[in-house]
Amino acid sequence: MIDIVPPLRLRLDTDALVANWRWLAKASGAAACGAAVKANGYGLGARDVVRHLANAGCRTFFVATWAEAAALMPLPAGVSLAVLHGVGEADMVAARMLPVRPVLNSVEQVARWRAGGEGRPCDVMVDTGMSRLGLRVEEAVGGALDGLVIETLLSHLASADEDSAQNADQLATFRALREAIPARRTSLANSAGICLGADYAFDLTRPGLALYGGTPRPEAAGHIRQVVFPETRVLQLRDVRAGETVGYGATWTAPQDSRIAIANLGYADGYLRGHAGSGGATWNGRALPLVGRVSMDLTAFDASEAGAVGEGDWLTLDYDLPATAAASGLSQYELLTGLGNRFERRWG
């Protein structure tokens, strides 16, 4: 077998992931703390995320699709999994075969599950203000759910990352739903919702972003640790004379004779053009500012002050999620989930 060194890698901090979940679990108070592992664990690798968090005590996980659910089989002992997008006609075979609950989102899905779910438990999403997935309140309380075995009654906060009056409105609506709809447990809060306080926790919280190093609200600042450290190899070091330009469009001109590191990285890997002008990397603690445009497979960094960095060395990208989002204009979610398959995932 040929041993190929990957051009890109994600250094993933297991201790930070677990510490983030434990902080969120503590902030959830008496509620159990689950985990959203959709989009392949927000880009980190869902199987590994589930394994690490299950070992830490997490017992409830959420994915978006049935393909994501199937990819996690077999589940660790004592762990449950739910599919947030519910169950379409084409999903029914998987829904009957896998030990996974659908989160029913419409009266059509409810009817489909009632007819073909063989009496198995389900979760139900009710829309309290997001106008995305979920039954309308009047549908949910009007008899559409009669006879279902509901494990978890859910809703989703639309503006939890903001100080919005909508949060209190959704909370009041969900409290009323809890009294009207029989379910074993209830769940409203995502990462940002956890930060809104104990009133939003109910029986189960389901964080996503904050598990992986994102800061959803100021209350989490200083508590959430960085989990993802993208690294890229240097392909070439080149000398650029004062007045010469670098990259497409000649957007950067060397102010003086400079040493430029060309890295094996680009927008095909999810490192987007929005990083130009603000992005950077480090090598042995020394800063290498990004220069010029990000191209498909290559990005240039100014290594003039980086000492003896050379071909094949690994640069660590600046990737603190809140800071990088603010500088690049990309959301923290995009920064995580956009990282491509050419990155080798390495847990440590």
Image (cartoon, rainbow, N blue to C red):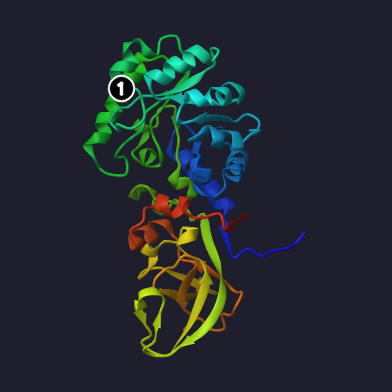
Q: Is residue 168 left or right of residue 146?
A: left
Q: Residue at x 41, y 61 (%)?
A: 272
Tell me residue 319's x, y (percent). Answer: 45, 61
Tell me residue 82's x, y (percent). Answer: 51, 29
Q: Residue at x 54, y 81 (%)?
A: 237
Residue type at the position of mark 1: Arg
- The quarter of the picture where residue 345 lies is bottom right
Q: Identify residue for label 1.
A: 136
Q: Is residue 208 left or right of residue 141?
A: right
- Is residue 74 placed above or below 329 in the rendered structure? above
Q: Residue at x 58, y 80 (%)?
A: 310
Where is the C terminus found, in terms of image quarters? bottom right
**Residue in front for this viewpoint, 153 or 101:** 101
Residue furthest to the left? 165
Tell me residue 238's x, y (percent). Answer: 51, 84
Where is the N terminus found, in terms of image quarters? bottom right
Q: Is residue 1 left or right of residue 88?
A: right
- The quarter of the picture where residue 191 lies is top left
**Residue in front for this viewpoint, 71 or 88:** 88
- Is residue 58 placed above or below 216 in the rendered structure? above
Q: Which SS class for mark 1?
A: loop
- Is residue 80 placed above or below 5 in the rendered structure? above
